[in-house]
Image (cartoon, helix red, strand yellow):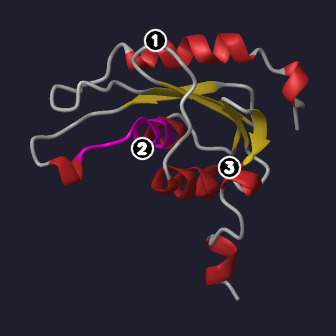
């Protein structure tokens, strides 16, 4: 796996900012973009897409995971997320669970506090391995 120092986090953040520029956020006015490096070297991204029925709005992480699957699958290794100002944003709990499914505990997240493994952001996570026991 690529170490955090070997990843161009600024370039990954630029992809997230571009994704954020395509967000559909007419209700909250809070566009979000996300980007992640996949274990085969490609980058996937997503943006939030709101809905008048707030509960069925889609987070940027949902779009990113859909793009991951649409473009061949794989495992997420490095992840960043930005708000409408392009500043680093930490995924909510629901999105951390979604990222866990496709990146696992070793997925590295860029946070305002630095690069952290998902295992620190979502301790004792429930995942696919629990369903096979």
Q: Is residue 61 magenta?
A: yes
Query: Real-space Cα distance between discs 3 and 2?
Result: 13 Å
Boundaries of the magenta span = 57-65
Asked if the residue at tag 2 contacts the one at tag 3, i.e. Cβ–Cβ closer than 8 Å, the answer is no
The kind of secondary structure the magenta stretch mainly shows is helix
* Residue pointed to by mark 1: 18
* Residue pointed to by mark 2: 62
Q: Residue 40: horizontal and vertical position, in percent?
A: 74, 32
Q: Nearer the viewer, residue 108 or 133?
A: 108
> Vertically, is 7 above or below 66?
above
Q: Sequence order check: which comes first, mark 1 or mark 2?
A: 1
Q: Sequence order check: which comes first, mark 1 or mark 3?
A: 1
Q: In the rendered view, does 53 fall on the left or right side of 93?
A: left
Q: Which element is circle 1 on?
A: helix
Q: Residue furthest bottom?
A: 133
Q: Label 2: how many residues lie within 10 Å, few (<14), some (14-19) or many (20+)?
A: many
Q: Indicate the quadrant containing the N terminus: top left, top right, bottom left or bottom right.
A: top right
Q: Residue 21: horizontal and vertical position, in percent?
A: 36, 13
Q: Which element is circle 2 on?
A: helix
Q: Which element is circle 3 on?
A: helix
């Amino acid at each position: 796996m690529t170490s955090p120092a070997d990843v161009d986090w600024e370039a990954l953040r630029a992809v997230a900012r571009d994704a954020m520029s395509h967000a559909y956020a007419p209700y909250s006015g809070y566009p979000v973009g996300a980007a992640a490096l996949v274990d085969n070297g490609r980058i996937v991204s997503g943006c939030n897409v709101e809905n008048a029925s707030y509960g069925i709005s889609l987070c940027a992480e949902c779009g990113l995971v859909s793009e991951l699957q649409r473009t061949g699958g794989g495992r997420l290794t490095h992840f960043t997320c930005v708000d409408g100002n392009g500043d680093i944003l930490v995924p909510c709990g629901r999105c951390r669970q979604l990222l866990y499914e496709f990146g696992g505990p070793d997925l590295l997240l860029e946070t305002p506090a630095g690069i952290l493994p998902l295992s620190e952001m979502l301790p004792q996570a429930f995942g696919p391995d629990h369903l096979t026991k």
